[in-house]
């Protein structure tokens, strides 16, 4: 009488493939594949460490994506924390000082709420967030942007201290009617301007190389 009670013979079960012996080279290869898949999964889950964003040097394609990501995060921030227009006004994207401040705050948030962050990092971010809100209030007050109207931040010209081609910004006040439409127009303007900068740099480098070869 067969008294074998192994998993492969009880109740007519099929043999357990996992228990089947594999050739050493196949087993080693399978383990390596599983190890790499696990590493890729962890890397995708944790992502890269957030870095400060230098808005002056981003290439056009990165500039567009970062602006869209920042806009989505700022929208989440103002709704989650009930921030008034005196802290985050609708036209913050039109004011570099607000854009840089909010960008720094977002990168700090990404770092503090990263899956690898220490447990006290959330408190550290909220502490810095309180300080950043005061700076944002100052920026908004100085800039003159409001909930229903906006004008570019004024720049004080220094006597003999400006470039020859520098012109002061047009500080005409305009009503805020469709914020989303204006933001998308702003993104397009920035991309066009950054592409023009890149093209000018490429032409300058090309001209220098051509002159050196003459």
Image (cartoon, rainbow, N blue to C red):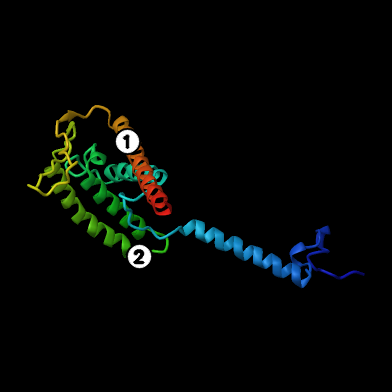
- Residue at screen point 36% across, 47% down: 204
Q: Nearest the camera: 47 or 113? A: 47
- Residue at screen point 14% across, 47% down: 162
Q: How many marks?
A: 2
Secondary-structure class at tag 2: loop
Residue 119's disc is 2
Location of residue 50 in the rendering, given as x and y in whole percent from the top left corner: 38, 58
Location of residue 66 in the rendering, given as x and y in whole percent from the top left corner: 37, 46
Can you say whether 177 is above or below 63 in the image? Answer: above
Q: Nearest the camera: 127 or 101? A: 101
Secondary-structure class at tag 1: helix
Which mark sits nearer the N-terminus, 2 or 1? 2
- Residue at screen point 30% across, 35% down: 186
Q: Nearest the camera: 81 or 6? A: 81
Task: Tell whether label 1 touches label 2 (CB within 8 Å).
Answer: no
Location of residue 77 in the rendering, given as x and y in whole percent from the top left corner: 29, 46
Residue 15's disc is none
Outermost residue toward the bottom in this view: 24
Comparing marks 2 and 1, which lies closer to the viewer?
Answer: 1
Q: Residues within 10 Å of mark 2 (few under 14, many from 20)?
A: few
Q: Residues within 10 Å of mark 1 (few under 14, many from 20)?
A: few
Outermost residue toward the left in this view: 159
Question: Pointer 1: what residue?
Answer: 189
Outermost residue toward the right in this view: 1
Location of residue 193 in the rendering, given as x and y in whole percent from the top left corner: 32, 39
Q: Quadrant of the N terminus?
A: bottom right
Instruction: Measure how far apart labels 2 and 1 are at the Cα level.
Output: 41 Å
Residue 112, quarter of picture:
bottom left
């Amino acid at each position: 009488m067969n008294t074998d009670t192994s998993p492969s013979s009880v109740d007519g079960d099929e043999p357990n493939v996992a228990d089947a012996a594999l050739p050493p080279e196949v087993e080693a290869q399978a383990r390596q594949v599983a190890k790499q898949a696990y590493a890729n999964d962890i890397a995708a889950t944790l992502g890269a460490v957030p870095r400060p964003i230098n808005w002056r040097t981003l290439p056009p394609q990165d500039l567009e994506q970062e602006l869209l990501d920042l806009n989505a995060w700022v929208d989440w921030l103002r709704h989650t924390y009930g921030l008034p227009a005196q802290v985050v006004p609708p036209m913050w994207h039109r004011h570099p000082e607000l854009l840089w401040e909010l960008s720094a705050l977002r990168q700090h948030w990404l770092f503090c709420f990263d899956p690898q962050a220490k447990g006290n990092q959330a408190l550290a971010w909220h502490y810095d967030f309180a300080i950043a809100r005061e700076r944002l209030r100052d920026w908004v007050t100085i800039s003159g942007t409001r909930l229903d109207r906006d004008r570019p931040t004024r720049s004080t010209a220094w006597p003999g201290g400006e470039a020859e081609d520098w012109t002061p910004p047009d500080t005409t006040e305009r009503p805020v009617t469709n914020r989303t439409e204006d933001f998308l127009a702003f993104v397009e303007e920035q991309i066009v301007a950054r592409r023009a900068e890149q093209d000018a740099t490429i032409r300058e480098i090309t001209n220098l190389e051509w002159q050196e070869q003459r």
